[in-house]
Image (tube, rainbow, N blue to C red):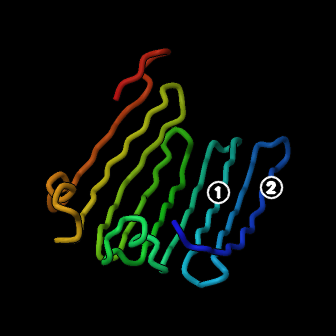
Amino acid sequence: IGQDAVFNLEGNATTGPEGRHAEARLDLTRIDQATASLGLAATLDLAQRRIGLDVEGSETGGLMASLTGIGQAGDLTLQLKGEGPLDDWRADLALAVQGLVAADAGLALAYGENPSIDLQAEVVPVEGAMPADIAAVLGDRLTLAVVGGQRAPGQFVL
């Protein structure tokens, strides 16, 4: 992206007896300027068949404007939080780029006899922020629904 940046990365991971439980944490922080951070915490409990995931990130140093070439693209925030059983895990995702777009999504994953995924998302661009060709596709809001899974061995549907 054409900019030097210095980051600090810290993390740890642990497992419980017989590897039936695992926890991980990862923190990435820009240290030459206080403009970017990303944190991840995850837990997996195979005995209880549960998983937890928490991801939070932000960038306030103009990265989105540089990447998109759109000057009014401002701060970026990201949050993904999910908790639940492996056969009915659900998460909420929120992503926002100030002056450009906001998106919210619900994600459901089932890891069982017939694995499946269900994603419901809504993307709302800031009026006038998108180039005309992209705005023509998005309109004032884009709603996305994707459902898929394995119905039988070797048979997948979307």
Q: Is residue 109 left or right of residue 65?
A: right
Residue 71: image quadrant is bottom left
Alpha-carbon span between mark 2 and mark 1? 11 Å
Residue found 64% across the figure and 62% down from its top = 41
Question: Tag 2: Cα neighbours inside 10 Å, few (<14), some, or many (≥20)?
Answer: few
Estimate how packed mark 1 is, as few (under 14), some (14 to 19) or many (20 or more) residues with alpha carbons within 10 Å: some
- The residue positioned 69% from the left and 47% from the top of the image is 45
Vertical order, 79 against 52 (above or below): below
**Spot occupied by residue 22 in the image (x, y as percentages of width and height):** 74, 51
Instruction: Pinpoint residue 38: horizontal percent, then vertical percent.
Output: 59, 69
Rendered image: mark on residue 42: 1
Q: What is the secondary structure assignment of the residue under circle 1?
A: strand
Q: Split into 4 quadrants, where in the image is the C terminus? A: top left
What is the x, y in percent for residue 49?
Answer: 63, 42
Q: Please tell me the numbered disc located at residue 14.
A: 2
**Precedes in sequence: disc 2 or disc 1:** 2
Residue at the image point whose x is 51% and y is 66% from the top: 1
Which three-letter amino acid code belongs to the residue tagged 1? Ala
Which type of secondary structure does the marked residue at label 2 adopt? strand
Q: Which mark is residue 118?
A: none
Could you tell whether 36 is left or right of 148 in the image? right
The image quarter in which residue 68 lies: bottom left
Report which quarter residue 36 is drawn in.
bottom right
Left or right: where 18 falls relative to 151? right
- Asked if disc 2 and disc 1 are in contact, CB closer than 8 Å, the reply is no
Nearer to us in this view, 112 or 100: 100
Between residue 33 and residue 9, name the one nearer to us: 33
The residue closer to the viewer here, 104 or 38, is 38
Q: Percent x, y for residue 79?
A: 47, 66
| Amino acid type, label 2 | Thr
Q: Residue at x 15, y 62 (%)?
A: 140
